[in-house]
Amino acid sequence: MTADSNKHSYAAVDLGSNSFHLLVAHCDHGELRTQDRIKEMVRLGGGLDADGNLDSEVQDRAFACLARFGQRIRGIPQENLRAVGTQTLRRMKQANAFLMIAETALGTNIDIIAGREEARLIYIGVTQGVPGEDENRLVIDIGGGSTELVIGCGLEPLETASLQYGCVSLTRRFFGDGRISRGRWEKAVNSAMADLQELRLRYQATGWQTVIGSSGTIKAIEEICRRLGWREKVISADALHMLRDRILEFDTIESVRLPGLSERRHPVLIGGMAMLFACFQVLGINTMTVSPYALREGVLNDLLGRTEQKDPRDKTVEAFMQRYSVDAAQVDRVRRIALTAYDKIADSLYARPVHRRLLEWAAQLHEAGLSVSHSLYHRHSGYLVEHSDMAGFTRQEQLFLASLVRCHRRAIPGDYGDALPTRLQEPLRMTLMCLRLACILCRGRDDASLPEFRLSASEETIQAGFSPEWMEAHPLTLFDLKQESRELKALGLRLRVMTSPGS
């Protein structure tokens, strides 16, 4: 495939707790047409111990799989690629170290997404092509390490939740030695039901007209029920009870024999079955239709929306600004100056378009903490950004934003970027410098006092030039800039302020 034809190709990679998926599609007149699908049962979640350490054999299996995926997506533009990691990567103790090798093997960045963001993307994927724009639907996706439940109307999620049980984790916890008994089954179901009880009233109050299931577990259960002649194209509560009784006739997982059950799904079916049974019981579900789509389709459609300037993160930031009543004029002032600074030194940066967007969003959010208190408001801003549910943002993006807004003024802590992977350290350093400079220049909260300025950057030195007339009229700002030259040492940068007649 030529480079020119690749510019309309998109790819999504889903690093699930049980399976890794690759979906490649071609965009034709705004619609995605699937070109290729690859699925490998890596069982990443099965290799994670209670302390979050990953088994070396499973780790090698994951890297080998990603290398194969990397070959398939080679040549597709980076902006048309997105890879996401879910529950196992959220739990992994050395996730950043794993990602360094995994991203090299795959050839693109891997984003760790929060449970609610996973639920949102699953809903986007599952609802593609589903009729009934005006009715509420409940979507349930049982993954390897977590289960996502979403109520939405049309393409808009209304309620999202992510539970820390999936087919792998439930199987390991309650059937870890491979033995099956009714007592173990009831403990597994009751444990899942206890988690579901926390959302039952809220979900029932919102209500739904149809229930849709996705993921390998649910598709496997639907196939088994169909082969046994219990239902066609749907899963019923009666069929689930009969399947439970059939499974409990076996003494071990190894001995389970059911029509339509693949060898790859066989080891974790009982945990997924227990989770689905609990969902039916707690939420009073009678029938569920099964979708062929899931997280990767949602990632792909969300990615296409971003490239077509329909980025859901913009809506999230706008809602955040309204919620915390930020001064719109001031944050726009800071945004304009920060982006101007960024653009002046962009040629010196190792940066991608997303880093500029993150700087823009940080400028819009940096004063959110004023709604809590003026004292140390930058820390409040950082806390709100880090710990809020921000639809559309990955975990790394949210931590990046939180670091920017938390450190936009006062002293920069030595560990300001420790939570981020290595690839984001340099973009964070330079975008933080741009935001801090903008906040200093906009301190007067007045458009008339904003200067024209020159800016250049090397690896260790930032040079800022202002006209002599402006410098003479703004002694407080010059004092702040001199103070800033000391603060930026924490970033390994030296700020030089000079007269620049042409500014």
Image (tube, grey):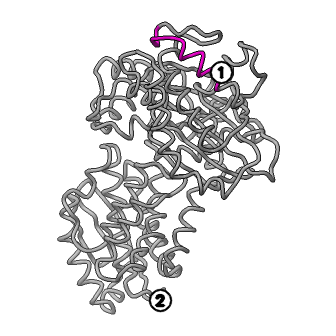
Which numbered dot is residue 242?
A: 1
Q: Nearer the viewer, residue 412 or 51?
A: 51
- Residue drawn 48% across the image and 21% down it: 268
Q: Which residues are magenta?
A: 241-254
Numbered label attached to residue 448: 2
N-terminal of the pair, mark 1 or mark 2, is: 1
Q: What x and y, as percent, mark residue 224?
A: 66, 16
Instruction: Answer yes or no: is residue 439 visible.
Output: yes
Please provide percent x and percent y for residue 258: 61, 10
Question: Where the C terminus falls, by quadrant?
Answer: bottom left
Mark in front: 1 vs 2: 1
In this view of the protein, can residue 44 be seen by the observer? no
Q: Position of residue 373 (x, y in %)?
A: 35, 81
The location of residue 13, given as percent across then percent down, is 53, 31
Name which quarter of the figure residue 127 lies in. Answer: top right
Q: In the structure shown, which secondary structural element does the residue marked by tag 1 occupy?
A: helix
Residue at 58% across, 32% down:
277
Which residue shows up at 43% across the image and 65% down it? 362
The three-letter amino acid code for the residue at tag 1 is: Met
Q: Residues within 10 Å of mark 1 (few under 14, many from 20)?
A: some
Q: Nearer the viewer, residue 358 or 178?
A: 178
**Of the pair 416 and 228, the residue shown nearer to us:** 228
